[in-house]
Amino acid sequence: MLYPQDDQVRHVRLNAQHPKKVIPSWMGDSVGRWDGDTLIVNVDNMNDAAWHDAYGNFHSDTLKVEERWKFVDRDNIRAQVTSIDPRVFS
């Protein structure tokens, strides 16, 4: 059985800008950049129907997400996610 997340692919464009005119989508638009050994990914332009997390928590179409990915050692990656949605979170 396939779950919704099993067939999802997300492209992260490096050293780019978010497009000015884009139709919001389930996965949004991901733009990444390196800060030393940490990959920082900013996600914008998600629609309000997208799953924000594994629990399906509510969010609005103003949601922005910042992800920080860092290799801790050869077998581990540390992921930190910050969600910003002024209509829902305080």
Image (cartoon, rainbow, N blue to C red):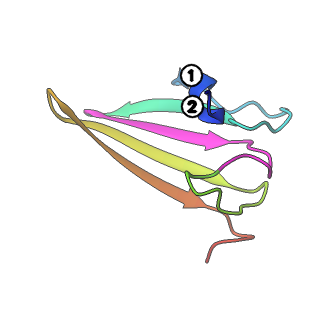
- Circle 1 residue: 13
Give the structural element (helix, strand or loop) at label 1.
strand
Query: How many C-alpha atoms fall within 10 Å of the one at disc 2: few (<14), some, or many (≥20)?
Result: many
Viewer-side residue, 75 vs 64? 75
Tell me, for residue 3, which label it has, or none: none
Q: CA distance from mark 2 to mark 1?
A: 5 Å
- Circle 2 residue: 31
Q: Is residue 3 left or right of residue 59?
A: left
The kind of residue on which mark 1 rests is Arg
Q: Residue at 71% x, 63% y: name it.
A: 58
Image quadrant containing the C terminus: bottom right
Q: Are marks 2 and 1 in contact (CB under 8 Å)?
A: yes
Viewer-side residue, 34 vs 48? 48
Q: Position of residue 45 (x, y in %)?
A: 74, 42
Q: Residue at 79% x, 49% y: name it.
A: 49
Q: Quadrant of residue 79?
A: top left
Q: Is residue 23 left or right of residue 14?
A: right
- Mark before the other along the chain sequence, 2 or 1: 1
Q: Position of residue 38 (x, y in %)?
A: 31, 36
The kind of residue on which mark 2 rests is Val
Q: Is residue 33 left or right of residue 31?
A: left
Q: Position of residue 40 (x, y in %)?
A: 43, 39
Viewer-side residue, 33 vs 84? 84
Image quadrant containing the N terminus: top right
Query: What residue span does the magenta drawing correspond to?
Result: 37-51
Above or below residue 11? Residue 71 is below
Q: Is residue 40 magenta?
A: yes
